[in-house]
Amino acid sequence: MKKLLLIWVLVAASVSSLFAQNRTVTGKVTSSEDGGGLPGVSISAKGSSKGTTSSVDGSYSISVGEGASLVFSFVGYNTQTIMVGNRSVIDVKLVVDNTQLSEVVVVGYGTKKRVEFTGAASTIKAGAIAERPVQSFSQGLTGQAAGVNITQPNGLLNNPPVIRVRGLSSLSLSSFPLVVIDGIPISTDNVSANSTTNNPLADINPSDIESIDVLKDAASAAIYGSRAGAGVLLITTKRGKSGKAKVTIDSWAGVSNAVRLPKVLNAEQYMYHKNMAIGNALLLNPNAVTATQRNSANQSFL
C-alpha cells in the first residue's frame, strides 16, 4: 500500500511539473502601417510543431514551453521571431515587406511598379543569369520564368533554341516571341526549329544584360500589335554608372566535332567511276552519251 501511494505521489509531481513548464501566451498582431489587426497570421513555436493563426481582429492564443520563441509570418510582411521569456502577453506589429513592392516591371511604354502592375509578366535579373555558366541569354532564361518553354531542337552548332511563351503553334504567324532590346525590336523571322542559318540571338552577350522581362498576356504586350501574339522578351542592357571604373572579363572556349563525316573520292577515283558510268550507259544505249560527255571523260577510256 505504501508503495502504491509513493508511486501516485511521484506521478502527480511529474505531471504538475510538466504543466508548470508550459505557459499560454496571448496577444494581438497588428500592421505597422495603420495599426489594424491582421487576420490569418501564422504563429508557430520555433523548433516545434505547435502553431496557430490569428483571428479576425488579429488576436491569438498559443501554449508554449519555457524558453520558447514565437515566429510570426504573413504574406507581404517581414517575418518576426520573438522570445517568450516569462511573458504571457505579447503584442506584435508586423512591418510591410517593401522588397517585392518596390520592384519595377519593364513594359512596352516604360516601367511600372510591381505592386501597380496587373498583367502577366516575369522578370529575370542580371544576378540570376550571372550565377549560371551560360553562353547565350536563352540558356540563362531556361528555368527562370514560369510558363516559358525553351528547348534545343538538335545538336547543330549555333542552331537557335525554340522559345515558346504563348502557345506552341500558330496558323499564320511565327510562334517565336518578339525580342526587344532596349526598345528596339530585332528580326527573328528566320529563327525556327529547322533553321540552319546564323542565330541572331547568339550575338547577345549574357554579361551585358541588366534584366529580361517576359510579357505573356495580351494586355501587357498590346502596344506591339500582332507581332506580340506569341509573347514579348524585353531585354534591358547595362548602362554606365558613376564611380570607379570596373573591368570584368569572361572567357569561354569550346570545340565542336562532327559526329560523322562522309567519305569522298579523290580525283583519280572520281574519274574512274565517271568512266565506268559512261561505259555502262553506252552498253545500254549507244546514243545516251552526248559529245560533251565523251569529251569530259577520261581519254584513256575512250
Image (tube, rainbow, N blue to C red):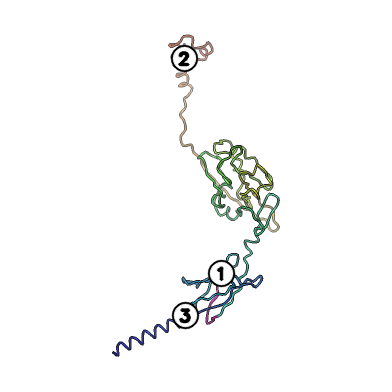
Residue flagged by tag 3: what amino acid is it?
Answer: Asn
Q: Secondary structure at mark 2?
A: helix
Q: Residue at x 56, y 52 (%)?
A: 146
Mark 1 / mark 2, whichever is N-terminal? 1
User: Where are the magenta residues, as a range?
Assistant: 79-88
Q: Which mark is residue 41?
A: 1
Q: In the current view of this chain or complex, which residue is farthest to the bottom?
A: 2
Residue flagged by tag 2: what amino acid is it?
Answer: Ile
Question: Tag 3: Cα neighbours inside 10 Å, few (<14), some, or many (≥20)?
Answer: some
Q: Nearer the viewer, residue 211 or 173?
A: 173
Whether residue 181 is in magenta: the answer is no
Q: Which mark is residue 278?
A: 2
Closer to the camera: disc 1 or disc 2?
1
Mark 2 / mark 3, whichever is N-terminal? 3
Residue flagged by tag 1: what amino acid is it?
Answer: Val
Residue 243 location, quadrant: bottom right
Q: Residue at x 61, y 37 (%)?
A: 172
